[in-house]
């Protein structure tokens, strides 16, 4: 069965860090564009970061310099390292597999809450 399984997330204070993981089963991630999205209450889902099969990365302006997307093709996993978290980063985060035409699979989502 093809699926993306997310882990990580939780409640942290402003300035702290979290790492999200997205592990694939049923297929190999290496040839795909992998993305992290987030959706805050009452807002549309937005692209946070993406990493190409070759390792090229793109970030939303609001997270540049704070978030890092990476992939481990041996572990078949994509990561989102989030440093210096801010309250406005609070959202449900989703990983997604993109075949360069469209998103084909979503992770189950994980809550990230940043609050003092």
Image (tube, grey):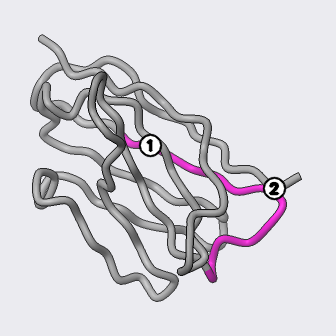
For residue 2, the mark is 2
Front disc: 1 or 2: 2
N-terminal-most mark, 1 or 2: 2
The relative height of residue 30 versus residue 105 in the rendered view (above or below) is below
Residue located at (30% from left, 22% from top): 41
Residue 79 percent coordinates (x, y): 45, 55
Image quadrant assignment for residue 40: top left
Residue located at (29% from left, 21% from top): 113
Q: Where is the C terminus found, in terms of image quarters?
A: top left
For residue 20, the mark is 1
Circle 1 SS class: strand
Q: Residues within 10 Å of mark 2 (few under 14, many from 20)?
A: few
Residue located at (65% from left, 62% from top): 104
The relative height of residue 54 versus residue 50 in the rendered view (above or below) is below
Comparing 75 with 107, the one in front is 107
The relative height of residue 101 versus residue 35 in the rendered view (above or below) is below
Image quadrant assignment for residue 111: top left
For residue 56, the mark is none
Residue 90 falls left or right of residue 101: left
Q: Which residues are magenta?
A: 19-31
Farthest residue to the bottom: give it.
Answer: 54
Residues marked 1 and 2 touching at CB (< 8 Å): no
Residue 57 percent coordinates (x, y): 31, 75
Q: Residues within 10 Å of mark 1 (few under 14, many from 20)?
A: many
Residue located at (60% from left, 49% from top): 106
Is 30 colored magenta in this rendering?
yes
């Amino acid at each position: 069965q093809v699926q993306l399984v997310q882990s990580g997330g939780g409640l942290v204070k402003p300035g702290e860090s979290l790492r999200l993981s997205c592990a694939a089963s049923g297929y190999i991630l290496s040839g795909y564009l992998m993305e992290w999205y987030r959706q805050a209450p009452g807002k549309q889902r937005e692209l946070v970061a993406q990493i190409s099969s070759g390792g090229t990365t793109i970030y939303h302006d609001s997270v540049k310099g704070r978030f890092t997307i990476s992939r481990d093709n041996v572990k078949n996993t994509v990561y989102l390292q989030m440093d210096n978290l801010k309250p406005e980063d609070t959202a449900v985060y989703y990983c997604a597999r993109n075949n360069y035409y469209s998103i084909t699979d979503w992770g189950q989502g994980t809550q990230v809450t940043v609050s003092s």
